[in-house]
Amino acid sequence: MIQPLPPGFVAKVGGGPQVLGLIEGVADSAASLLQIPSGYLADRMHRLKALTLAGYVTASALRPMLALATWWWQILLIRVGDRAGKGIRGAPRDTLLAETTAQKQLGRAYGFHRAMDYAGAIAGPAIAYGLLATGFTTREVFALTAVPGVVALCVLGFGVSEVGARAVVAAEKIRIGLPASPLYRRTLIAIFVFTLGASSDTFLLWRAREVGVPLEYAPLLWMVLALVKSATSTWGGALSDAQGRRKLILAGWSIYAAVYLGFGIATEPWQIWVLFAAYGTFFGLSESAETALVVDLVSEQWRGRALGTYNAVIGAASLPASLTFGVVYQLEGARTAFAMAAGIALVAALILPKRPRAEYE
């Protein structure tokens, strides 16, 4: 419900692109960096449901507090806490999915998870748009996010059980660090480089406003993006099972580069709508393939830490990505900023390590 609203809300409290970049970059980094200790605890304690629930409780409690924010630094603190909840739950949840799914269907499972996540992101902006259109304020919409938060906690707490637990591993064997796989490490480098050009998606909403899309249509734009993500994620994950992870990742990154070039040169509102729809396919093709690839490349005992480190690498690059993009956007304009991001994506595609398809399976 709140995802399309921060750009306009930040502008109302006196912030610009640089402030928006700081807020979203720090928030995303907090989420990803916390996945290292969360992944370690998932491997050592193997309390996957408890860790996941803790993450959802944190986010659900803090998100409605945006209704009380009057300064941009308050938005920053709340968003960081909200995203910290995501960091706590991410690695144990993804590990639980890996342990309850056959290897040959892993990409499909992660794709289906993303599809359901994005299906919720379709309903959320639709509700927000309906509330705003009938007279609710942005602050009131923020406050009402407490309702789905409570429902989600009830479903997780009473409707989800841990199954297929792995054999207990001696505590001294569960250490912090990186798996020994050289391919896993080289893959992380490529993902880090790609993420350096992948700034927060809220800049796309900022760009939409510049091109002439009315602010009240922001939730609808976000809903279009979520619809395409949801429609393509299960298919993209299943395709990575059949065709290999690397091929799907490269396809997604190439689409990302093309779409970002389009955002830089767009001049009409209808072009923004088309670009948002095309951008959704990038997520469908690459997200679940990347997560499944991480699981493919490590042993069972390293899953939590490998997944946590993967997300931490994304987080380490997210802050400089959003800050740099915001500065370039403000100083040099949209065309230069979006072209820079597209170029970085193509460089990452070139350094993604090669591996025969059979070795992914």
Image (spheres, helix red, strand yellow):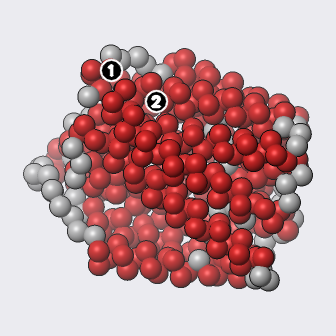
Residue 283 at x, y = what percent?
54, 42
| In the rendered image, the vertical position of residue 305 relative to residue 192, given as above or below | below
Confirm whether residue 360 shows in the render.
Answer: yes
In terms of depth relative to the viewer, which is nearer, 66 or 171?
66
The kind of secondary structure element at disc 1 is helix
Q: Is residue 327 above or below residue 124?
A: above
The three-letter code of the residue at mark 2 reads: Leu
Taking depth in this image into account, of 184 and 126 the one nearest to the observer is: 126
According to the picture, the residue beneath numbered tag 1 turns out to be: 357
Q: Position of residue 361 (x, y in %)?
A: 26, 28
Give the amino acid at mark 1: Arg
Q: Is residue 250 left or right of residue 69?
A: left
Q: Residues within 10 Å of mark 2 (few under 14, many from 20)?
A: many
Kindly check if marks 2 and 1 are in contact, taking CB atoms under 8 A apart as contact.
no
Q: Is residue 263 above or below residue 43?
A: above
Any part of residue 45 in sight: no
Residue found 32% across the figure and 76% down from its top: 157
* Relative to 41, residue 133 above or below: below
Mark 2 or 1, nearer chain start: 2
The location of residue 133, given as percent across then percent down, is 78, 76
Q: Residues within 10 Å of mark 1 (few under 14, many from 20)?
A: some
Q: Which residue is mark 2?
A: 248
Residue at point 28%, 41% (across, down): 105
Horizontal side of 296 relative to 343 (left or right) equals left
290, 238: nearer the viewer: 238
- CA–CA distance between discs 2 and 1? 11 Å
- Image coordinates of residue 149 in percent, x first then y, are 50, 76
Q: Secondary structure at mark 2?
A: helix
Label placed on residue 30: none
Q: Quadrant of residue 275?
A: top right
